[in-house]
Image (spheres, rainbow, N blue to C red):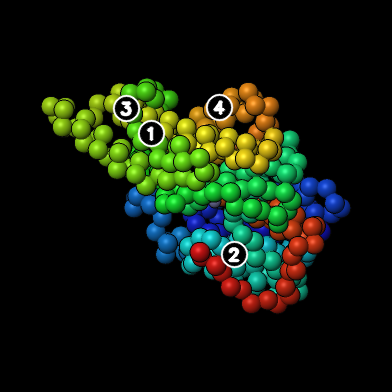
Amino acid sequence: MLVLGIESSCDETGVALVDASGSGVPRLLSHALHSQISMHQAYGGVVPELASRDHIRRVLPLTQEVLSGSGRVLSDVDVVAYTQGPGLAGALLVGAGVAVALGAALDRPTLGVHHLEGHLLSPFLSVDPPQFPFVALLVSGGHTQLMRVDAVGSYELLGETIDDAAGEAFDKSAKLLDLPYPGGPHLAELALRGDAQAYRLPRPLLHSGQPDFSFAGLKTAVLTQIRRLQQANADGLLCEQQRCDVAASTQAAIVEVLVKKSLLALQDTGLKRLVVAGGVGANKQLRAQLDAACARRKVRVHYPELHLCTDNGAMIALAAAMRLQAGLAQPTLQGSFAVRPR
Ligand code: KG4
Ligand code: ZN
């Protein structure tokens, strides 16, 4: 069974083909990605209308690239999967529309996939895939959640952010330091040369005893810290070392909370496996601290391949294939498509 997956929920167009013959973990045959980051950078964030238009331009050439990369043709595809949500409505509609149109043209069924399920299952494409059950830390630009995962489709939400997502905290703090969008990786880069102890920033809900998160207050604290430094400097600007120190202190605050809450979820569930997924899962400091803390507790940590941490088509094709293998999904022939932005 060959599953084509299309991701278009935000600012990356991703297409991939997986082979889900048999009962083993589906095999990634080929994938292609186009990032719109440089296009949105001038605006400091994603412009939804531009995103939709660019998905339209990219999705078919990327599909061609994936097919030729795997030595297959369109008629070899058995199921066409697409991201149904959450995401930007217009952007989602492009992927969904193309998927349903391809399905109709090829007389093949289509299947809508939850974007977060894609992130959650993405470590199954790594060389050392996890085994069920595990705790999942989902940390992206839009979500921060801890889940108990017993099987494909069996997800229990243990806790989540009550306001901003971890990626949002990275991005908003990075913006205050005049770093380009999306700020997370840029802030992490700056933090390499900074002192994480330089400024004490708040760690909201750190001691709540619940696997919940709150990051909205952090950006205000970062702003206050930056203002304080600006006022103390004769030129009203931060020197380079201060920028690095603010970045390192911000990253430390976010990472400490993510690590502590992940450990709490592991302790509460008694599970010994942790899966980290979503864009923030690419953060090296987060990985180092989780690895160290989990090693002490004999917990195994699994990450997606670095290039599959952020949005991509492979995770969507994989999630669809795993749902189909598990008999959890019924793809629809000539289906209508309803995207679910929220
Ligand atoms: O999963 P993703 O690609 O898109 C969403 O579904 O949101 O995650 C994007 C988020 C952005 O907030 C980005 O700044 C963050 O992941 N991110 C990082 C790093 N790489 C990506 N944050 C911190 N450190 C990184 N290395
Ligand atoms: Zn995502």
| Residue hosting label 3 | 199
Amino acid type, callout 4: Ala
Front position in the image: 55 or 165: 165
| Residue hosting label 4 | 288
| Residue hosting label 2 | 84
Residue shown at 25% from the left, 35% from the top: 226
- Residue lying farthest right? 22
Total numbered labels:
4
At label 3, counting other C-alpha atoms closer than 10 Å, the crowd grade (few under 14, some 14-19, many 20 or more) is some
Q: CA distance from mark 1 to mark 4?
A: 16 Å
Q: Are marks 4 and 3 in contact (CB under 8 Å)?
A: no
Q: Are marks 1 and 4 in contact (CB under 8 Å)?
A: no
Of callouts 4 and 3, the N-terminal one:
3
At label 4, counting other C-alpha atoms closer than 10 Å, the crowd grade (few under 14, some 14-19, many 20 or more) is few
Tell me: 338 left or right of 107.
left
Residue shown at 58% from the left, 35% from the top: 263
